[in-house]
Image: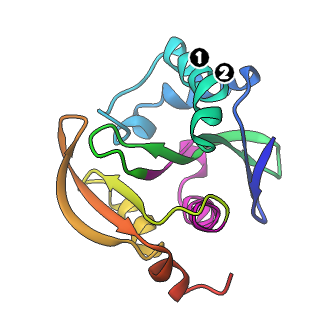
Amino acid sequence: MTILETDRLYLREYTENDLEGLSEIFSDEAVMKYIGKGGVLDKAYAKLHIDTWSKKLYGQFGFGLWALIFKENNMLIGQCGFNILKETSEVEIAYLLAKNYWGKGIATEISGATADYGFRVLSLKKIVAIAYKQNQASINVIRKLGMKYEGEKVFFGKNLESFSLIPGDFYKTRSV
């Protein structure tokens, strides 16, 4: 099921057919360096990730991390969506891209559309984002969304930069 679409991309729910592609992305050290606790994840984890979202959490929350598809070649190139942060119970926007798709504005494009979906369709009142201080590319995307810096907080046992966004700040700079 397609969740949302942009000019170049679309998000859809994960299916079992995504296992190989997601496993390949999860196995790339450069991609996974700043995700969660940091470090590659194996194929068993990729399967658990897909099963957890597709068989439980989409229904429980009405949202999740969705498969990110590049329209030009219909390839799974990452994920984007919302997650509940265990430490704070806040709704986090999260994204992950295969290395071949870095530097093309894709993270900014899909995270903007996802934030809009969160506010307009899901009626979220606040979205947060977290990032490793060293991950300046991700922090740049977060800032382009209009997120406000909230300081350093502990997630996954690590000190991470924390940001938040409310609808008024998001739509201030957009004509959606």
Write the start and end of the magenta stretch as one range. Answer: 92-120
Expressed as whole percent of the image width and height from the top left, the position of residue 116 reads 61, 68
Depth order, front residue of 92/100: 92
Label 2 secondary element: helix
In the figure, 100 relative to 135: above or below? Answer: above
Tag 1 near tag 2, CB within 8 Å: yes
Q: Which residue is mark 2?
A: 19
Residue 64 sits in quarter: top right
- Identify the mark at residue 47; answer none if there is no mark: 1
Residue 65 sits in quarter: top right
Task: Report the amino acid beneath label 2.
Answer: Leu
Task: Report the amino acid beneath label 1.
Answer: Lys
Expressed as whole percent of the image width and height from the top left, the position of residue 46 reads 55, 21
Task: Report if residue 96 lies within the magenta region.
Answer: yes
Which quadrant is the C terminus positioned in? bottom right
Residue found 52% across the figure and 48% down from its top: 82
Q: Residues within 10 Å of mark 1 (few under 14, many from 20)?
A: some
Residue found 63% across the figure and 35% down from its top: 58
Task: Report if residue 142 lies within the magenta region.
Answer: no
Q: Is residue 145 left or right of residue 131?
A: right
In the figure, 8 relative to 37: above or below? Answer: below
Q: Is residue 23 left or right of residue 72?
A: left
Residue 53 sits in quarter: top right
Depth order, front residue of 137/122: 122
